[in-house]
Image (cartoon, rainbow, N blue to C red):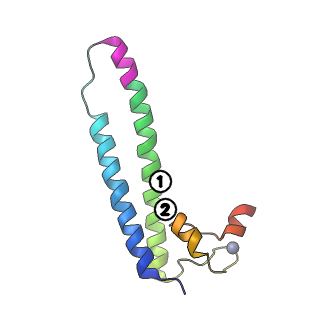
Amino acid sequence: MTDLKHYADLITARIAELDTRMHEVDHELGAPMTADMNDQAIDLEDDEVLEGLGIAAQKEIALLNLAMERIEDGSYGICKKCEEPISEARLTAVLYAPLCKNCARQS
Ligand SMILES: [Zn+2]
């Protein structure tokens, strides 16, 4: 039996962590640009990397929110495809995993 409370805590902590990171990214993106053209070019490249991180964090938060919904309706930790329980090792590694290892490999 999957310990839903345990995973709910982990997911909540992970969402908070990502949320903090996204705010840090926002802060960095909002930083004023330097007047020097060379520095500005470097800043722009940095911004693209930061935006990428922000998008990745946003996507993960969306997946984690879906996982929270599955915890609430009791389907968390059950593979969506074959309906077998997902191993704890996999859930710990990928908190929002909707599929078991075998099905994820096939898709
Ligand atoms: Zn499966």
Seen in the picture, residue 51 relative to 20 is either above or below; the reply is above
Q: Quadrant of residue 45?
A: top left
Residue farthest along the right direction in this orientation: 106
Q: Is residue 106 left or right of residue 72?
A: right
Q: Is residue 94 visible?
A: no
Q: Residue at x 26, y 14 (%)?
A: 35
- Residue 70, position in %: x, y? 49, 76
Residue type of the residue flagged with mark 2: Leu
Residue farthest along the front direction in this orientation: 89
> Mark 1 — residue?
59
Q: Quadrant of residue 72?
A: bottom left
Residue 40 magenta-highlighted: yes
Q: Is residue 10 left or right of residue 20?
A: right
Q: Residue at x 27, y 23 (%)?
A: 33
* Mark 1 and mark 2 residues within 8 Å of each other at the beta carbon: yes
Residue type of the residue flagged with mark 1: Lys
Mark 2 secondary-structure assignment: helix
Q: Which mark is residue 47?
A: none
- Residue 83, position in %: x, y? 66, 80
Q: Is mark 1 within 8 Å of ligand 1?
A: no
| Predominant SS of the magenta segment | helix
Q: Residue at x 33, y 55 (%)?
A: 19
Residue 70 magenta-highlighted: no
> Mark 2 — residue?
63
Look at the image and give the residue range highlighted in magenta.
36-43
